[in-house]
Amino acid sequence: MLISCSGSKNPTSGMLPAIERYTGGVYKSIKKARREGYWPAETDILIISAKYGLISGDTPIEMYDQKMTRDRAVELQKEVSSSLDVLLQERNYNQIFLNLGSIYLQSITLSSEIDRARQSGRLQEVAGEIGMRLRQTKYWLEEQHKEDRKISIG
């Protein structure tokens, strides 16, 4: 799962895992899925942060206030795309779920692995305004959990 950082954050001082620092809608959905037991097994969370670039959900980060702008996304393109390519090659995911707004998408335009995943049908991208993307994310989480249950049941 590849998602963007969130403007709303947990204001606790010190370092927190990114998944705990960010508190926007997608993060609330992820936390709810984990709490209620329908988080899909073996799903990694990758985050594109305006401040940190590409990080995992477990990466400790401090409180910050930096908005992703088109200029910042372009500035991050090489670093984020390269890091993402290495990671996707290493992990060889059979499915990639992408929930990024148009500005955040700019930061991955140089990723050849995202292009490959798109062409092979392994990439599922949500589209539309933030509310629509949030609904699609919730639906994806529920569907992945159903698939996990089918596999584990037999």
Image (cartoon, rainbow, N blue to C red):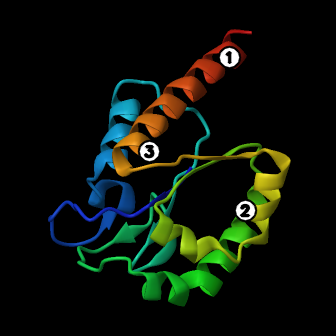
Q: Is 144 above or below relative to 131?
A: above
Q: Residue at x 71, y 43 (%)?
A: 95
Label 2 Cα neighbours within 10 Å, binned few <14 / some 14-19 / many ≥20: many
Q: Residue at x 64, y 86 (%)?
A: 78
Nearer to us of marks 2 and 1 is 2
Quarter of the image that includes the C terminus: top right
Type of the residue with mark 1: Ser
Residue under label 2: 114
Nearer to us of marks 3 and 1 is 3
Q: Secondary structure at mark 1?
A: helix
Q: Is 83 above or below relative to 4?
A: below
Residue under label 3: 133
Residue under label 1: 152
Type of the residue with mark 2: Ile
Image-quadrant location for residue 145: top right
Q: Residue at x 77, y 63 (%)?
A: 115
